[in-house]
Image: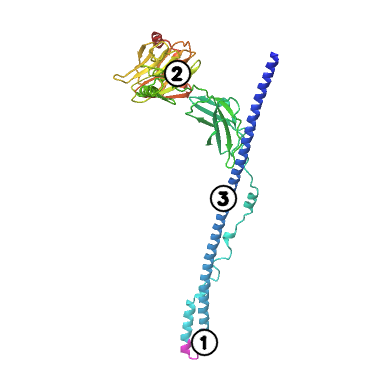
């Protein structure tokens, strides 16, 4: 009976998994169908634009050629009209002279005849008819009309669509995930000199394997990548994985997407646990700020409710200020007294993790570190054997120190704007860095015997927290170097434990 139940359970699990795969495939098909419809409409618009542009070029060429022909016509007509006018005038003068010469032949008086003959001779010598070129200055051929479009016509008739680029291939070996950056590298399956650029798409996901359509974030796009490699930088790894795909584009069309790949981008993500914070601390998202009116405003609310309860029926017994009913209390009580502390909401039980903290410039006092869950609500970070921290004090006298078990070690370094915190739970190491330069500020060496929580103390100021960060490469290198050294650092840590 039990074996049959187990077999049936396996069948049910297999069917559920297969149904999930089929549903995801159906969603992919619907998504692809919408893409086909949208892309075909877009391509038709682009085709109209291309042919409209071609028609526009031909219209411009036609207008230019028409103007050239008209200009040549006007120039030749003017030249011929001028030559015609000159010839007409010369002909009229010549006919007049011929008539005068014919009349002179009838003169009988020798003296008058000689006078007329001399006049005719002078006029003939000066006559324009003998200086004219009897050849047209221009021909009637229109030189700009001598155009042969046969080659262009043949070329237009052989116009074809540009070939669709093949899908690129992403090379997982060449892809790199480090320092909250992802470098994606790809190659074309065969050389294509018509490729103009590439489009890279990515999205965050908590699912390993192939991308899903339903209940997933939208793809984010990076266009006009000229090379075959791209680096996304400054990412927050608030999901376990990222999907990537790439497509090639020529001047006319985009090709198919590459097979998507999934890269692991896991990093520690946590928020501040507002249920644990001191009443004088205001927690919003990943920021905690000193609020001197916090406890008083809470007390006034309680008193107001009690006063309302006194009119009429007696009010039920109230809890003390700062405490919470057991049904609403989380895993621990609020910090109280002078322990202006708030913890992270995610316990660290293994692995290496990194986060950063920035303090407001005029913050009077703050601490950054780790603590066991058992840290008491009156305890301060670094003053118990269950907490480790570095403490900055800007009140009256500035100090910078590492604290553990109520012992302090002064740090002779400049307090950075951002503090990087590195926790190697399995290796029993807690290190603090200048987040900008990766200079090591201090390291605790210990053995964690139970899960630890990020801890923060702030008085008269504000702290902002950055999570979703990988352990920086520089920190990993420094840790290897530090772990390979022996000397004063380890002895100081041992002295403080």
Q: Is residue 109 magenta?
A: yes
Q: Residue at x 58, y 51 (%)?
A: 52
Query: Over which residues does the magenta segment extend?
Result: 101-113
Residue denoted by label 3 = 53
The x and y percentages for residue 311 are 38, 24
| Residue 289 makes an appearance in the image | no
Residue denoted by label 2 = 325
Question: Between tags 1 and 3, which lies in front?
Answer: 3
Q: Residue at x 60, y 28 (%)?
A: 210
Specify few, some or many for label 2: CA neighbours under 10 Å numbering under 14, 14-19, or 20 or more. few
The x and y percentages for residue 149 are 62, 54
Local secondary structure at mark 2: loop
Quadrant where the C terminus sits is: top left
Local secondary structure at mark 3: helix
Question: Between tags 3 and 2, which lies in front?
Answer: 2
Specify few, some or many for label 1: CA neighbours under 10 Å numbering under 14, 14-19, or 20 or more. few
Looking at the image, residue 428 lies above or below residue 152: above
Distance, label 1 to label 2, CA atoms, is 146 Å
């Amino acid at each position: 009976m039990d074996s049959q139940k187990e077999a049936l359970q396996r069948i049910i699990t297999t069917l559920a998994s297969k149904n999930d795969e089929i549903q995801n495939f159906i969603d992919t098909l619907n998504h692809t169908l919408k893409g086909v419809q949208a892309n075909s409409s877009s391509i038709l618009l682009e085709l109209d634009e291309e042919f409209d542009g071609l028609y526009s070029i031909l219209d411009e060429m036609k207008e230019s050629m028409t103007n050239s022909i008209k200009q040549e016509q006007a120039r030749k007509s003017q030249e011929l009209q001028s030559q015609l006018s000159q010839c007409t005038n010369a002909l009229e003068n010549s006919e007049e002279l011929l008539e005068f010469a014919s009349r002179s032949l009838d003169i009988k008086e020798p003296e008058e005849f000689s006078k007329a003959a001399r006049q005719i001779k002078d006029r003939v010598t000066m006559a324009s008819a003998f200086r004219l070129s009897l050849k047209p200055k221009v021909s009637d051929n229109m030189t700009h009309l001598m155009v042969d479009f046969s080659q262009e016509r043949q070329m237009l008739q052989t116009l074809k669509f540009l070939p669709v680029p093949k899908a690129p291939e992403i090379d997982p070996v060449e892809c790199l995930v480090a320092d909250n950056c992802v470098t994606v590298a790809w190659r074309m399956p065969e050389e294509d000199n018509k490729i103009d650029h590439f489009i890279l798409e990515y999205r965050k996901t908590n699912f390993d394997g192939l991308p899903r359509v339903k209940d997933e974030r939208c793809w984010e796009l990076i266009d006009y990548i000229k090379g075959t490699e791209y680096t996304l930088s400054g990412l927050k790894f608030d999901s376990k994985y990222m999907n990537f795909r790439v497509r090639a584009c020529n001047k006319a069309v985009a090709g198919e997407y590459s097979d998507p790949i999934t890269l692991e981008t896991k990093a520690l993500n946590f928020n501040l646990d507002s249920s644990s914070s001191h009443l004088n601390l205001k927690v919003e998202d990943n920021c905690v700020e000193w609020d001197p009116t916090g406890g008083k405003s809470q007390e006034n609310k309680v008193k107001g409710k009690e006063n309302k309860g006194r009119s009429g029926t007696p009010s039920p017994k109230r809890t003390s200020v700062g405490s919470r009913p057991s049904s609403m209390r989380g895993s621990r009580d609020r910090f109280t007294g002078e322990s202006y502390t708030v913890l992270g909401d995610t316990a660290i039980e293994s692995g290496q993790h990194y986060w950063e903290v920035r303090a407001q410039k005029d913050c009077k006092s703050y601490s950054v570190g780790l603590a066991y869950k058992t840290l008491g609500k009156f305890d301060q970070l670094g003053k118990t054997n269950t907490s480790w921290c570095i403490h900055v004090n800007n009140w009256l006298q500035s100090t910078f120190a590492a604290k553990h078990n109520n012992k302090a070690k002064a740090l002779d370094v400049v307090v950075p704007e951002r503090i990087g915190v590195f926790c190697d739970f399995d290796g029993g190491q807690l290190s603090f860095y200048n987040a900008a330069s990766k200079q090591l500020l201090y390291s605790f060496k210990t053995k964690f015997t139970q899960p630890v929580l990020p801890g923060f103390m702030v008085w008269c100021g504000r702290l902002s927290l950055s999570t979703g960060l990988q352990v920086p490469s520089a920190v990993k290198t420094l840790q290897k170097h530090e772990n390979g050294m022996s000397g004063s650092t380890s002895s100081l840590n041992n002295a403080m434990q």
